[in-house]
Image (cartoon, rainbow, N blue to C red):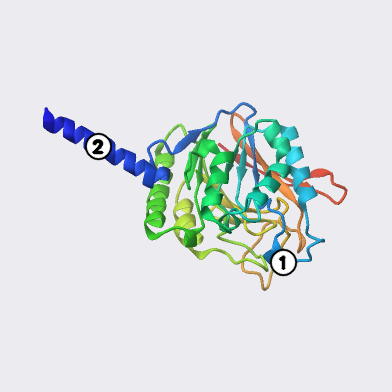
Amino acid sequence: MVNKLIWKSALILFSFISLVIFPGFSEKDEIVVIANKRNFIIIGDTQRIGFWESLYWDYWSEHNKEKTKLLFKEIAREEPDFILHLGDLTRDGGNDTAWNEFDEDYQFVKEKGIPVFPVFGNHEYFGNEETLLINWNKRFPQIKGRKWYSLDYDELGIIMFNSNFDELNENDKAEQLKWYAEKLHEMETDNRIKKIIVAGHHPPFTNSKIVNPNLDVAKYYVEPFEKTKKGILFFSGHCHSYEKFVRSGKYFIVSGGGGGPRQKLNTNKLTRKFDDKFNGPVTRFFHFCKLSVNQDSIYLDVVGLDKGNHFIIKDNFRFKK
């Protein structure tokens, strides 16, 4: 009897330590989101321009906070079930002032009580990490401190991973990759899950003239995703534009048009690295994506802001369940 009590106490202690050290690896890493409106929004790179970015861009021509507010105001009007944010919420995650700017920009969403499920962008790691985590956990308590997690939404499995590999220690990188492979397999074999969506900050493919495609994302996260039958969409940001790539019958969407200083793309078909299926200009529109679900189909609308500050659908496509 004593031995059983000792063994049970040890198990409880180990479970507690695991949750403290590895909060993203608990059995309850999946967050169930109720589908009321049967649609949600994807947006990325809503940070205001900071000092370092002002070295690459003209500060005033790409000081886009009013555009970001318009995007969030339109999202609030839509009243989606939630927002999936692709990272770079702020210009400096370790700065309280930058988080206050974020609060100001997304106040319309907050007033409607629309939950936000973000991934970490590289700007989140600028500055003091303790300040980052305090602000992050304060605004997104539903994530419960996890650095990666998954969502269960209306027969969709959504995997949210942390692509800031330089900010993760070797153990974290190995644990996340193991979790990712297991989560893909779990969703692939779950008859209740019809389709799989993956989201991270750094793009595996981009023709940006400012940022590079992330080779580790392409190797360790895209390759397993391409092998799935249910995988349909792989979202990323970091490139402040809109791009659409298709590989193995799956769509890779770069959606970084949330207001961060826009980046020029190489649109020359002879010299660009990847075949962008969206025929757009070098500098593209501010935007968000709206994913809608019905009984037999999934629709994605790319909602852009035109020069007159009107919202129009710039691109759209459909998947059968």
Task: Count residues near mark 1 (Cα–Cα under 10 Å), then give few for <14, some for 14-19, many for 20+.
Answer: many
Inspect this view and state whether residue 44 appears. no
Where residue 130 appears, x then y in whole percent? 51, 51
The amino acid type found where label 2 is placed reads: Leu
The residue indicated by pointer 2 is 11
Residue shown at the point (62%, 58%) measured from the top left: 238
What is the residue that sits farthest to the right in this orientation? 308
Task: Count residues near mark 2 (Cα–Cα under 10 Å), then give few for <14, some for 14-19, many for 20+.
Answer: few
As helix, strand or loop, the secondary structure at mark 1 comes to: loop
The amino acid type found where label 1 is placed reads: Thr
Where residue 309 appears, x then y in whole percent? 84, 46
Q: Nearer the viewer, residue 48 or 189?
A: 48
Residue shown at the point (63%, 37%) measured from the top left: 40
Residue shown at the point (68%, 68%) measured from the top left: 209
Instruction: Tell me: 214 left or right of 263.
Output: left
Q: Nearer the viewer, residue 224 or 148?
A: 148
**Number of disc labels:** 2
Name the disc covering residue 267, or none.
1
As helix, strand or loop, the secondary structure at mark 2 comes to: helix
Instruction: Tell me: 32 left or right of 273.
Output: left
- 172 up-or-down from 11: above or below: below
Where residue 53 appears, x then y in whole percent? 69, 64
Marks 2/1: CA–CA distance? 57 Å
Where residue 304 appears, x then y in whole percent? 76, 47
Instruction: Tell me: 12 left or right of 61.
Output: left
- 170 up-or-down from 314: above or below: below
Which quarter of the figure has residue 274?
A: bottom right
Q: Foreground mark, 2 or 1?
A: 2
Mark with earlier residue (2, 1): 2
Quick one: quadrant of the C terminus? top right
Quick one: quadrant of the N terminus? top left
Q: Nearer the viewer, residue 202 or 136?
A: 136
